[in-house]
Image (spheres, rainbow, N blue to C red):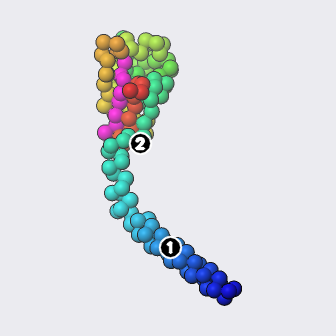
Amino acid sequence: MSGRRQQLEDATATVAGWLRWLGHALVEPLRADPDMEMRLAIPDAQTTMTKGDVGWPKRPPATVACPECSAEIFQYRPHGTLNCPECYVQRSSEEFSALELLYLTCPVCRERMEHGRRHPQQFDVPEWATCRSCWYHWEFEHF
Ligand SMILES: [Zn+2]
Ligand SMILES: [Zn+2]
């Protein structure tokens, strides 16, 4: 009786060993092939924006035109004071929407971003921005 039980335990151990080997054999080629990882990653990057932020406090750095001399004023944080590097004019962050927005800068790769508004009647600030270089995306608010 105890011999039969031993046989059964041996058989179970062998099956478990095969399953471990099988699982390993199935998973390992996927890990080893970098091209396969690329193919798996690309559709994901195109359909869902994996990098991104939402909300005005996380708005990408902006460059606006100076209202006095039209030099470019760079504003890194949306609550930062706007200081013209040419004529030293100052504007508070609340006056941002009154200034002409030239472009937003991608916080990831520092390329210029495409930006736009979804409700031009309600907002006079950008409501979205997309980087065509690294696909970083920013939204003013959730849909
Ligand atoms: Zn100026
Ligand atoms: Zn970018």
Q: Where 101 falls versus 43 (above or below)?
A: above
Q: Residue at x 50, y 20 (%)?
A: 79
Does 104 appear in magenta? no
Secondary structure under badge 2?
loop
Q: Quadrant of residue 35?
A: bottom left
Would you name the residue on which mark 1 appears? 19
| x, y percent for residue 44 | 36, 48
In the picture, the disc for residue 61 is none
Q: Residue at x 48, y 70 (%)?
A: 23
Q: Residue at x 34, y 13 (%)?
A: 122
State left or right for residue 11 relative to residue 66: right
Contact (Cβ within 8 Å) of mark 2 with mark 1: no
The residue under label 1 is which amino acid type?
A: Leu
Q: Where 38 falls versus 113 (above or below)?
A: below
User: Is residue 32 in view from this perspective?
Assistant: no
Secondary structure under badge 1?
helix
The residue under label 2 is which amino acid type?
A: Thr
Would you name the residue on which mark 2 appears? 50
Q: Quadrant of residue 16?
A: bottom right
Tell which tag, 2 or 1, sits nearer the viewer: 1
Residue in the foreground of this view, choosing between 37 and 12: 12
Residue in the foreground of this view, choosing between 28 and 86: 28
C-alpha span from label 2 to label 1? 35 Å
| First to last magenta residue range | 125-133
Q: 10 Å neighbourhood of mark 2: few (<14), some, or many (≥20)?
A: few
Main SS category, magenta section: loop
Quarter of the picture containing the N terminus is bottom right
In the rendered image, the residue lying farthest to the bottom is: 3
